[in-house]
Image (cartoon, rainbow, N blue to C red):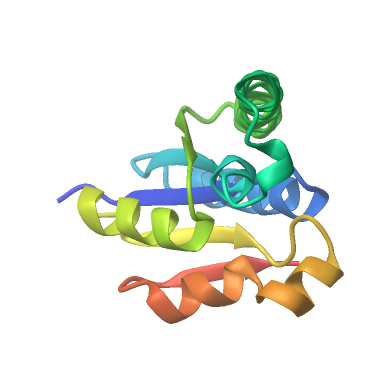
């Protein structure tokens, strides 16, 4: 049975430190298969804000955040490339904690690595931290990296 590791990233400093941690882990056990996932929830939330419902605004915001999500993935993938570790990357638009855990379950992920905070402490205080939600929902070990 292959051992699959999922690194959840949002491109933040803590997420990139989590990527460094995962890359070091994989360098010790090269048979581990790594997937990097970046889930952006801004587009999901946007549909609830009436001023942003204009088709033109939605299209522009959609393009901007899809590009931002791709940049976050690229920055994270660079960490693995720099460390000589092969990784597969994917992006999703949706609910980060739910989508990370659902992906992990569907793909038979054995371990999730995630940064402790992403976009800032205010978001964590108000909405609850994604990493905390992942720990609560996941059915595999989760390592949170500070």
The residue at 49%/45% (across/down) is 26
The residue at 68%/73% (across/down) is 127
* Quarter-of-image position of residue 74: top right
Measuring from the top left, give residue 110's x and y in whole percent: 31, 60
Measuring from the top left, give residue 92's x and y in whole percent: 46, 37
Please, is residue 93 above or below residue 66 in the view?
Answer: below
The residue at 84%/62% (across/down) is 120
Please, is residue 31 above or below residue 83 in the view?
Answer: below
Please state the total of marks drawn on the protein image: 0
Q: Nearer the viewer, residue 19 or 24?
A: 19
Measuring from the top left, give residue 44's x and y in whole percent: 54, 46
The residue at 70%/27% (across/down) is 61
Q: Is residue 52 left or right of residue 136?
A: right
Q: Is residue 23 left or right of residue 78?
A: left
Measuring from the top left, give residue 109's x and y in whole percent: 30, 55
Please, is residue 11 above or below residue 119 in the view?
Answer: above
Q: Quadrant of the C terminus?
A: bottom right
């Amino acid at each position: 049975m292959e051992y699959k590791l999922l690194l959840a990233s949002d491109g933040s400093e803590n997420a990139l430190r989590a990527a460094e941690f995962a890359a070091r882990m994989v360098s010790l056990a090269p048979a581990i298969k790594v997937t990097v996932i970046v889930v952006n929830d801004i587009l999901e939330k946007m549909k609830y804000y009436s001023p942003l419902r204009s088709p033109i605004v939605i299209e522009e915001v959609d393009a901007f955040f899809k590009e931002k999500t791709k940049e976050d993935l690229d920055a994270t993938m660079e960490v693995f490339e720099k460390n000589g570790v092969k990784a597969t990357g994917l992006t999703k638009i949706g609910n980060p904690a739910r989508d990370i855990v659902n992906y992990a379950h569907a793909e038979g992920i054995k371990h999730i690595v995630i940064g402790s905070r992403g976009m800032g402490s205010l978001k964590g205080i108000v909405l609850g931290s994604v990493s905390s939600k992942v720990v609560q929902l996941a059915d595999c070990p989760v390592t949170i990296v500070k």
